[in-house]
């Protein structure tokens, strides 16, 4: 399936309330770490093991209503203070954020471009996907 872009608040509502586990990447075009981890998410979304999960992305600048509802605050600070302490002069807080949704509820989120944490979140989403399949198989057996 790959990673699909969410382009409206209505689409977002429909997706998170679909009953399937959904992982959403909240990113921005100006965010370097967002761009760096994007290929990792793409690769994971194409793995057969994660076929029961839907993957999406939301540009926080284009979809402010969604970002506000989820609590994503993309803040970039350019400051001499960061230069003095040896930090990157463009310091982004809460970007990227990956959120797991199920039945309209945010279950968990991961902040930052950490491939291991992202994979752990997707593995957690996969547990929800596996639980659905097992439940459907049990219901079929009962009939």
Image (cartoon, rainbow, N blue to C red):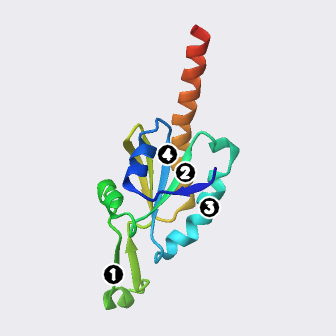
Between the C-alphas of marks 3 and 4, the distance is: 16 Å
Q: Which residue is mark 3?
A: 40
Label 1 SS: strand
Whether residue 48 is situated above or below residue 41 in the rendered picture: above
The mark nearer the N terminus, 4 or 2, is 4
Residue 133 pos. (x, y %):
58, 27
Residue 38 pos. (x, y %):
57, 65
Q: Between tags 3 and 4, which lies in front?
A: 4
The mark nearer the N terminus, 2 or 1, is 2
Q: Which residue is mark 4?
A: 22
Between the C-alphas of marks 4 and 2, the distance is: 6 Å
Q: Residue at x 69, y 44 (%)?
A: 48
Q: Between tags 4 and 1, which lies in front?
A: 4
Q: Between tags 3 and 2, which lies in front?
A: 2
Q: Which residue is mark 2?
A: 55
Between the C-alphas of marks 3 and 1, the distance is: 26 Å
Whether residue 81 is situated above or below residue 5 in the rendered picture: below
Label 2 SS: strand
Q: Which residue is mark 1?
A: 77
Q: Residue at x 54, y 29 (%)?
A: 131
Q: Are the residues tagged 4 and 2 within 8 Å (C-beta)?
A: yes
64 sits left or right of 118 in the view: left
13 sits left or right of 125 in the view: left
The mark nearer the N terminus, 4 or 1, is 4
* Mark 3 Cα shell of 10 Å, populated few (<14), some (14-19), many (≥20): some
82 sits left or right of 19 in the view: left
The mark nearer the N terminus, 3 or 4, is 4
- In-front residue for pair 17/8: 8
Between the C-alphas of marks 3 and 2, the distance is: 12 Å
């Amino acid at each position: 399936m790959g990673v699909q872009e969410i382009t409206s608040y209505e689409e977002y509502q429909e997706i998170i309330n679909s009953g399937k586990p959904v992982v959403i990447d909240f990113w921005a075009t100006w965010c370097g770490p967002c761009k760096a981890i994007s290929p990792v998410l793409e690769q994971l979304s194409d793995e057969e093991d994660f076929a029961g999960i839907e993957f999406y992305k939301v540009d926080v600048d284009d979809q402010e209503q969604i970002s506000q509802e989820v609590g994503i605050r993309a803040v970039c600070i350019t400051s001499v203070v960061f230069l003095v302490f040896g930090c990157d002069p463009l310091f982004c807080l809460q970007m990227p954020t990956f959120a797991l949704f199920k039945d309209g509820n945010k279950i968990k989120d991961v902040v930052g471009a950490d491939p291991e944490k992202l994979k752990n979140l997707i593995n957690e989403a996969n547990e929800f996907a596996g639980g659905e399949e097992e439940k459907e198989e049990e219901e079929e057996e009962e009939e």
